Amino acid sequence: MKILIAMHKAYPVSKLAGYLPIQVGAELSDQALIQDCVPDNTGKNISRLNTYYNELTALYWAKYNLQDEDIIGLVHYRRYFGNRASHDLNDVLTEETIRSTLKEVDVIVPKKRDYFIETQEQHYLNAHAELPYLTMKEVLAESYSEYSATFDMIARSTKAHLFNMSIMRQADFQLYTDFLFGVLEEVAQRVDMTQYSGQDQRSLGFLAERLMDVWILTNNKTIREFPLVTTEKTNWLDKGTQFLLRKFLPNMKKRTHF
């Protein structure tokens, strides 16, 4: 089992068995590699594209370099699956819990985020560049038509499993990443990502968050949700204020991920 902990800087991480810190975008870094981290620029990789794919460069690396593992997952250096919602690394899921859960369901996912007053599509378009998202809809309709109806249904929902976090068995992981990178690579062929700056340059990573549920539902995969262990506390007042400003004042400068 390998649960990748995506990292871009030195940071205290879980030391539990089965977890593997990985430095994303290692190919682009002009600094020394993070100690005790596997770099994502070995073997077959897209490390140089981390600017556009975010933590997905770790998933891509795992797809081709961890094929002997039974179970593959992805978490973040500040965000893990936990037995309860907390800020304590002692609550992070153990290998025993993960293995026993995957005997009962197909995929471990984070608890759904509910935006209540806007759909997933509205939320995305209020916060990000529109063209990559609209292009992804076209790609699904034209090249992955069996997923298109599910995507449209989820786009109208206020709820989704986010953060590109999941844990699943190897066979499912390969099928999921075939779909995920197939869609994103076609989007990248149609949209020049270099035209964007700031967070919009990372659009492929944000688009991926909208694809995991599409794959799960279309393929009738069973899931179990777990709460998050977050190593840093969220300023919910600030986050909520920015959410409302993006919705009701769409022309303002957007602040989304902080």
Image (cartoon, rainbow, N blue to C red):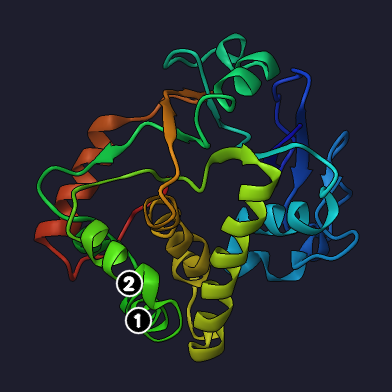
Q: Nearer the viewer, residue 157 or 126?
A: 157
**Residue shown at 53%/26% (left/top)?**
81
Label 2 packing within 10 angstroms: few (<14), some (14-19), many (20+): some
**Residue shown at 59%/17% (left/top)?**
92
Tell which residue pokes out farthest to the top in this image.
Answer: 90
Which residue type carries mark 2? Answer: Ser
Q: CA distance from mark 2 to mark 1?
A: 5 Å
In-image side of 225 versus 177 (left or right) = left
Could you tell me which secondary element the residue under label 2 belongs to? helix
Q: Nearer the viewer, residue 235 or 145?
A: 145
Could you tell me which secondary element the residue under label 1 belongs to? helix
Give the residue number, with chain letter if any, for mark 1.
141
Give the residue number, with chain letter if any, for mark 2.
148
In-image side of 93 versus 108 (left or right) = right
For residue 79, above or below residue 181:
above
State the image coordinates of residue 251 (x, y, percent, origin top left).
Answer: 18, 71
For residue 43, above or below residue 257:
below
In-image side of 22 versus 229 (left or right) = right
State the image coordinates of residue 59 (x, y, percent, origin top left).
Answer: 67, 53
The mark found on residue 188 in the picture is: none
State the image coordinates of residue 172 (x, y, percent, origin top left).
Answer: 61, 49
Label 1 packing within 10 angstroms: few (<14), some (14-19), many (20+): some
Which residue type carries mark 1? Answer: Ala
The disc, 2 or 1, on the residue closer to the chain's N-terminal end is 1
Q: Nearer the viewer, residue 196 or 131?
A: 131
Query: Which quadrant of the view contains residue 65?
Result: bottom right
